[in-house]
Image: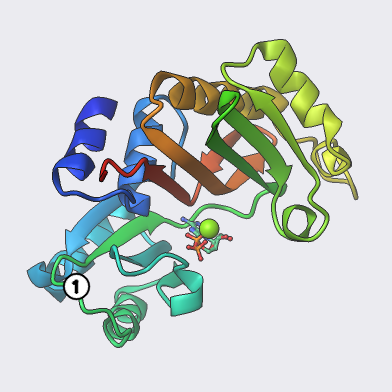
Amino acid sequence: MATVEEILSRAKNDNRTVLTEFESKELLNIIGIPIPSQKLVPVSEGLEKILEACSQIGYPVVMKLMSDKIVHKSDSGAVKLNIQSESDAKSAFNDLMSIECNDDQKAISIQQMAKPPIAEIIIGSLQDPQFGATVMFGIGGILVEVMKDVAFRIAPISDFDADEMIHDIKGFKILDGYRGNPPADLDAIKDTLKKVAQLAYDHPEIAEMDLNPLFTYADGILAVDARIILKSTKV
Ligand code: ADP
Ligand code: MG
């Protein structure tokens, strides 16, 4: 397995400031944040290799087009969920290939289809010019986008800080067993918050991180999408 430093320097050596979702999640997994199992197959290796990866991951799978040229994957049609069979996989591959994307490095990320969560949460980090590394927490969807229901702290954070962040937001009720749902695994959320804060603190070259969404369960958490952006080293 690669190290955090290796993944970061790979991007730096390529003069890239944006890590792909695949790389970002690989890095998160190294520091102990759970992700759906994933395999990366360059499009140049062809459909057979992609189908092989699908059966290794095990249906149902998700296929996503990875390219520097694509930022908001869903908006570009680059996310294919709940692929149940080889014939589904073939048609998903054809759909992904019809996306206009002039990139000879493009690849397909094949990943395990995660079970529906109790809630989707967002964890992020930013390097603040005044405070240094900061960490953000919110509930996914409109609560973040419209209601701005988020909590921030300066990194690194303690268990107490993480606990406060979770309880600070109005959306906490969603994590606390609403409509007969079991409560979300708050320890797993706290652990992820602390790990993201520590990563941002240890690596000031990480300008921004965005784990959006993380799926929360009664027992555990899964980062299904992530984006890591490095500081531009250009002067
Ligand atoms: P975008 O770049 O558009 O944010 P995402 O990777 O977040 O793309 O995928 C869009 C949505 O698809 C996610 O918000 C999530 O609800 C769902 N999704 C993505 N990956 C998985 C997965 N591996 N398992 C289950 N659902 C997923
Ligand atoms: Mg996303």
For residue 225, say whether it is visible.
yes
The image's colour scheme reads: rainbow
Residue 203 picture location, percent across and down: 38, 25
The residue positioned 24% from the left and 50% from the top of the image is 16
Look at the image and tell me in which quarter the C terminus lies. Answer: top left
Left or right: 108 in relation to 210? left
Q: Residue furthest bottom?
A: 98
Looking at this view, is 70 or 78 the one in front? 70
Q: Position of residue 114 (x, y in %)?
A: 52, 52
Secondary structure beneath label 1: loop
- Of residues 149 and 231, which is closer to you in this image? 231
- The quadrant holding residue 129 is top right
Q: Is residue 156 left or right of residue 148?
A: left
* Nearest to the observer: residue 197 or residue 139: 197
Q: 156 above or below 112?
A: above
Q: Residue at x 31, y 48 (%)?
A: 17
Q: Amino acid at mark 1?
A: Asp
Residue 116, x across and y down, in percent: 63, 55
Residues 90 and 175: in front is 175
Q: Position of residue 199 (x, y in %)?
A: 44, 24
Q: Is residue 3 visible?
A: no
The quadrant the N terminus occupies is top left
Q: Residue at x 49, y 50 (%)?
A: 224
Distance from mark 1 CB to nearest ligand 1 atom below 8 Å: no
Instruction: Judge from the rendering whether residue 195 lies leftward or rightward of residue 22; answer left or right.
Output: right
Residue drawn where x is 16% and y is 70% of the image: 43
Residue at the front extreme? 235
Q: Which residue is mark 1?
A: 103
Q: How many labels, in total?
A: 1
Q: Residues within 10 Å of mark 1 (few under 14, many from 20)?
A: few
Please give left or right for residue 175 compared with residue 213 in the image.
right
